[in-house]
Image: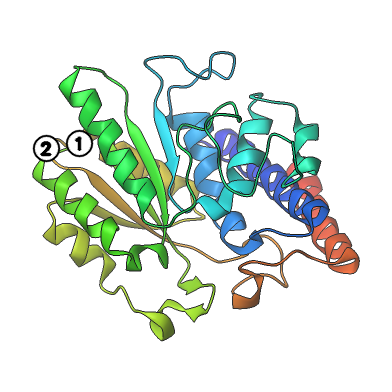
Amino acid sequence: MDNVKEKQLKIFAVKERMHIVDGIFNAKAGHPGGSLSIADVLAYLYNCEMNIDPKDPKMQDRDRLVLSKGHAAPALYATLALKGYFPESEIKDLRKIGKMLQGHPDMKHTPGVDMSTGSLGQGISAAVGMALAAKKFNEDYRVYTILGDGEIEEGQVWEAAMFAGFNKLDNLVAYVDYNKMQIDGTIDEVVSPHPVDKKFEAFGWNVITIDGHDFNQIESAYKAARECKGKPTCIVANSIKGKGVSFMESQVGWHGKAPNAEEYETAMSELKDALAELEV
């Protein structure tokens, strides 16, 4: 990846993180930790990887994204707003009654959302169904899904993984946000899903392990996924919960709470400084 492209992606990701913090602060509720940790992959998918058209969100041959970890909706909303699916001003109305952006993705009311999610474990099953449909009807679109590492403690995830591997859905890419934390503590303390890579491999998947905040590694992984034939691909991305906001990074407590006014100002100041440094 050339330096200009990488810089553009870093700028986009910082803007995503600013919207994430802004939305959750104004809502007084939400999930900042796991939203901040997937900003980089969403920046790459929507700027470099996926075939999309914000002016035509229901385009038949568009690539689909299913946010299986639906509580990280603020990250998806930030991305969609920055890409022009809806005005960025909508972010401040996150979770407000009667507004477009609710606490979990809603495909009926939010342009760019391909699947309503929130019940953990179910999103990947929907993604598998979309990928199977593409195969059955000879469609060229690809399907992407993002899961949490706590989420993969759900049994339905492994039923979907088994089905996808058996049906050789090489148009499907699952991205596991491996930040090693969930609402009740570290995944090791709750129900360890280790070894994640070997489990997916056992179900017939091509598995790639990366640094989820390194755009060059993200790019290489998705290119390898496109080149892999006869198997779905799982990208296990080592990531940092709360990435980009110093006091939220690697802190379990920031899984599902909003910053107060002082914390908001600190977070936004850090992100604005990061953006200013990149835009020099």
Residue in the picture at 63% in, 36% down = 8
Question: Is 250 displayed left or right of 168 in the figure?
Answer: right
Residue 157 is situated, as x and y percent measured from the top left of the image, at 29, 57
**Marks 2 and 1 in Cβ contact (< 8 Å):** yes
Q: Is residue 225 above or below residue 85?
A: below
- Percent across and percent down for residue 232 are 21, 43
User: Which residue: 64% across, 66% down?
Assistant: 256
Q: Percent position (x, y) of residue 224?
A: 27, 40
According to the picture, the residue beneath numbered tag 1 turns out to be 170
Between 41 and 257, which is closer to the camera in this rendering? 257
Q: Indicate which disc, 2 or 1, sits on the residue closer to the N terminus.
A: 1
| Residue at x 68% of width, y 32% of height | 81
- Type of residue at label 1? Asp
Q: Is residue 214 left or right of residue 99?
A: left
Q: Residues within 10 Å of mark 2 (few under 14, many from 20)?
A: some
Q: Quadrant of residue 191?
A: bottom left
Extreme-front residue of the structure: 98
Tell me the SS state at disc 1.
loop
Asked if one can make out residue 251 in the rendered structure from this viewpoint, the answer is no
Tell me: residue 63, above or below residue 193: above
Q: Is residue 206 above or below residue 108?
A: below
Is residue 5 toward the left or the right of residue 120 in the image? right
Circle 2 residue: 230
Can you see residue 247?
yes
* Quadrant of the snapshot with the C terminus: top right
Residue 190 pos. (x, y %): 41, 82
CA neighbours of label 1 inside 10 A, class few (<14), some (14 to 19), many (20+): many
**Label 2, label 1: how far apart the Cα atoms are:** 5 Å
Tell me the quarter of the picture where residue 241 sits.
bottom right
Is residue 48 placed above or below 91 in the rendered structure? above
Q: How is the image coloured?
A: rainbow
The three-letter amino acid code for the residue at tag 2 is Gly
